[in-house]
Image (spheres, rainbow, N blue to C red):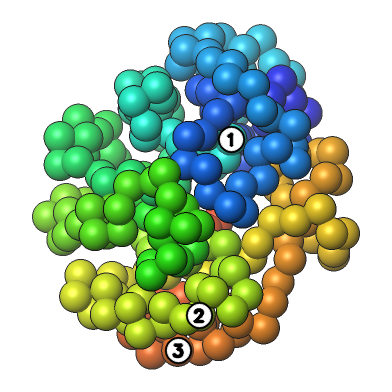
Amino acid sequence: MIDNEYVFAKDNKRLFLNTSLRCDGKCSYCYLSKMHYVHKGKKTAEEIIKSLEESPIEINQETLITIGCFSECLDEVNKRETLYLVKHFLKRGNQVQLSTKKQILESDLVEILPFLSYYGQFVIFISSATISKQNLIEHNTSPIQERFKSFALAHVYPVPIVLYVKPVLQEITIQDLALYVHYIETYKIKDVVVGSLFTTNPSDESVPFSNKQELFYQKNADEDILISELSKRAKVYRRSTEVLKNYKQKHE
């Protein structure tokens, strides 16, 4: 195992990377303080790669790379380092994923294209827990209208862009069901993940990016309703890893 805050892995199946331990989104459901990551530390991509080379984890092409659980990986503080890591691991043959509340720029995808070996090697998740109440709940994040423009790029470039309805906030997210349907139909979104809130209330499943047993999946009944309704318009998953697995199996 490796756990130095910026890098976490229980084994070589999945690797969680963060170039910083901060996020300025100020979402009401943020779990960083619960993980005690309230400082604003930062590392370069080179430093993270070096720490991996010195770790006991033997990374191979089957290792899934997940970037940004403890940061907004595409904000101005992290963006260049994030893209460096994405290109580094794509070149190694790894599958890479990141989630963001920022708008994906065409220039970012153009920069990544030369490093792709197959469709689905790099997957982007556009995160949203609410649409109509964004200013209250995700009030320092990119506006939904800008954020969701990213989905248009999935029809131009060979990079799947997934709607990440996560976390589902009870009696809040579901109020925007019609709006999520609208965006799915408008942008012809193929893949959707409906995910649970992370809380300190113990449940059967703890978060995969920590070994401290501090955060757990907190499912609510609204998730089932969202999955049932959105499944009529797109392929819906409960976990981001299911999306990556699906694309990898298609490639193989």
Q: Which residue is mark 3?
A: 229
Q: Nearer the viewer, residue 245 or 228?
A: 228
User: Distance from label 1 to label 3 (Cα)?
Assistant: 31 Å
Q: Which residue is mark 1?
A: 70
Q: Residue at x 62, y 75 (%)?
A: 170
Q: Nearer the viewer, residue 240 or 14?
A: 240
Say what secondary structure mark 1 lies in.
loop
Residue 108 appears in view: yes
Q: Residue at x 73, y 66 (%)?
A: 218
User: Distance from label 1 to label 2 (Cα)?
Assistant: 26 Å
Say what secondary structure mark 2 lies in.
helix
User: Residue 52's mark?
Assistant: none
Q: Say left or right for 45 vs 5.
A: left
Compare marks 1 and 3 and give the one earlier in the sequence: 1
Q: Nearer the viewer, residue 195 or 160?
A: 195
Label 1 Cα neighbours within 10 Å, binned few <14 / some 14-19 / many ≥20: many
Q: Say left or right for 195 vs 136.
A: right
Above or below — where is 162 with respect to 220? above
Report x, y in % for residue 67. 50, 36
Report x, y in % for residue 129. 49, 63
